[in-house]
Amino acid sequence: MAFIAEPVMGAGGVLTPPTSYFEKIQAVLNKHDVLMIADEVICGFGRTGNMWGSETYNIKPDIITCAKALSSGYIPISAVLINDTVYQLIAQQSAGLGSLGHGFTYSGHPVAASVALETLDIYEEMGLVETVQEISPVLQNGIRAFADHALVGETNGVGMLAVAELVSNKNTGEAFPSEKRVGPHLLDRALEHGLIVRALGDRIAFSPPLVISKVKIEEMFKRFGKALDDTKKWLETDQ
């Protein structure tokens, strides 16, 4: 048996785990001998301020899945990392069979593997994780500055992930009716201001390049602020 989770739920709305959540989950898994699988497709390779999101939240995974940033998105590749306990079981059974009875059609593709190896070297040479640790406070402070806006309920994030939730009632946190499509409307207004964001329903997600500058983060939020104000005016005239 296995339990799988993202350190931060990305496409689900940039949902960061409550304090001690994974610590308590891990204790239950260990008690019942259940494997922990960390889906690091989004969180891996520096996004949360450490090489792995598992490090950020003190997760002790038995298996890690990763992709995307493994090649900086330049070529399709994914990988599965396993700890020694899992490896030894596979090795023992494979030795009995005479071969590893598993594989993917494009496993070890030389072009993809070469790009991934070069990408990892570049990450190390440029100090990518250290760069994220230096720049991420600008992103986190920037998103939280919108907490007082009339349309914004929760603001949250970690590392170079951030989110602002749009709400119809700031005091109660009541959501807009889904048919109102407020998030997609804001997305269109942001595009008009030259900004690409992701509307996960009414949760507006930010996942900028890890090499973005402080100045560009500030500009990004200026444009987001304009899109928010445009959306507020639209709601006020659309009652």
Image (cartoon, rainbow, N blue to C red):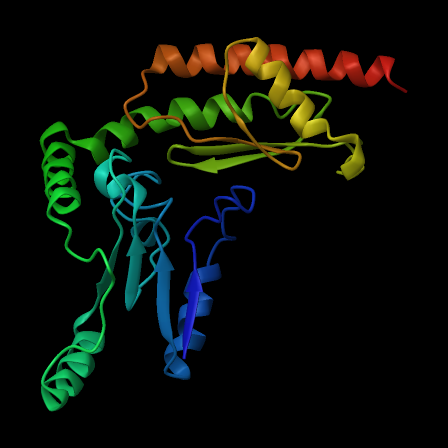
The C terminus - image quarter: top right
Q: Is residue 122 above or below residue 55?
A: above
Picture coordinates of residue 120, whole percent (x, y): 14, 40
Q: Is residue 64 above or below residue 71?
A: below
Q: How many marks?
A: 0
Q: Residue at x 49, y 49 (%)?
A: 9
Picture coordinates of residue 102, whole percent (x, y): 23, 73
In this rendering, would 189 be left or right of 44? right
Would you identify the image quadrant in which residue 84 lies? bottom left
Picture coordinates of residue 177, whole percent (x, y): 81, 37
Would you identify the image quadrant in which residue 87 lies? bottom left
Of 234 and 172, nearer the camera is 234
> Residue lying farthest front?
105
In this rendering, would 54 be left or right of 232? left
The N terminus - image quarter: bottom left
Q: Residue at x 13, y 42 (%)?
A: 111
In this rendering, would 61 be left or right of 200? left
Of 140 and 206, nearer the camera is 206
Q: Is residue 92 above or below residue 234?
A: below
Q: Residue at x 12, y 32 (%)?
A: 122
Picture coordinates of residue 76, whole percent (x, y): 27, 43
In this rendering, would 123 be left or right of 26? left
> Residue lying farthest bottom?
96
Q: Is residue 34 above or below residue 200?
A: below
Q: Residue at x 39, y 78 (%)?
A: 34
Would you identify the image quadrant in which residue 73 lies? top left
> Residue lying farthest right?
239
